[in-house]
Amino acid sequence: MHASLAVAFAYDRFLNSPSSCHRSLEECYHWSQSTALFNRRLRKPIKAKDRDPIWGTAAALAVLTFASPDAYTPEESWPLNSSAEDGLDWLYMINGKMSLWHVVNPLRSDSLFNVMAATFAQMHSPLPEGGIYGIPKALAAICLLEDSSTGDNNPYFNAAHAVSQVLVVPDGEVTTGQSQLFMRSIQGSFKGLLSSKDPVALVLLYLWYRKAGSSIWWIDLRARVECPAIHLYLQLYHKDNIALDTLLQQDAIAIK
């Protein structure tokens, strides 16, 4: 119950508050309570009746973590603020939720979440094994992708394909399953590049924020702050990169 109420207050924040608005005391309280109860529950053996509540709570906590950046203005936010916390801290909660997958199995026949089978399938759909088909030319160019590229020889490969799949979806129609493909690609060498503020990795994150945030409210809550922060960071530290700047100016929808 606490997790559901916290998400409800976060959604109210999305609907009625400016991007600089702090979380309400009510949202913080219910989030704190749900986290404490959830951690306590995970220390005990998981019974069959507990599996759906555990998955639902984990999903709610992942949403809350993503929807609640520590900064409230672009200037205070990662990557622009060098003293800001790790900009990918939300990823740990997302990965933590997925680590429960095999324990609770939300696809089992008696699960309340079985109705989301199509969404789960979309989340886990495979990305291309090689090549640049479907990637806009300008994006492939800055990622140094070509027909011979694979996930093994180019760190941007999977992320570029994941972003490209949502770029072709009309604004407002990106689904949760489609948005998760990019999150899934943030691992290995690409995650390292993103953490170190590599400009190409930041552009991929920026484009994903712009597109996914137009459809999914909890992504938009973070994108409102981090999108302009990424843009300002790239203009400040990589303004001489003409190809990168042109790509940003074109916007996600207009990339050709």
Image: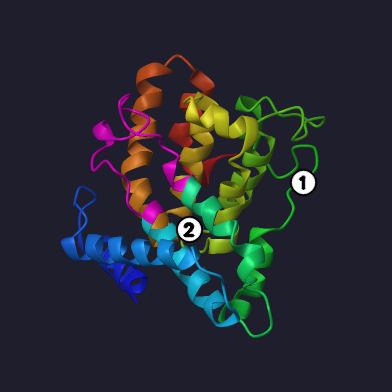
Q: Which residue is at the front of the view, 67 or 172?
A: 67
Task: Name the foreground residue: 116 vs 91.
Answer: 91
Q: Quarter holding the N terminus? A: bottom left
- On the rendered structure, is 90 left or right of 191? left
- Residue 169 in view (yes/no): no
Tally of numbered tags: 2
What amino acid is labelled 1 in the image? Pro
Cα distance in 3D space between marks 1 and 2: 24 Å
Q: What stretch is highlighted in magenta?
A: 65-91
Amino acid type of the residue that numbered disc 2 sits on in the rendered structure: Asp
> For this view, does 214 lie left or right of residue 30?
right
The answer to whether mark 1 and mark 2 are in CB contact below 8 A is: no
Residue 86 covered by magenta stretch: yes
Of residue 41 and residue 165, the one placed in the foreground of this image is: 41
Residue ID for mark 1: 128
Residue 171, disc: 2
Return the x and y of residue 100 as percentages of the image width and height: 59, 62
Residue drawn at the location 18% of the way across and 60% of the way down: 24
Judged from the image, the secondary structure of the residue bearing numbered disc 2 is loop
Q: Could you tell me what secondary structure mostly forms the magenta stretch?
A: loop
57 versus 228 height, above or below: below
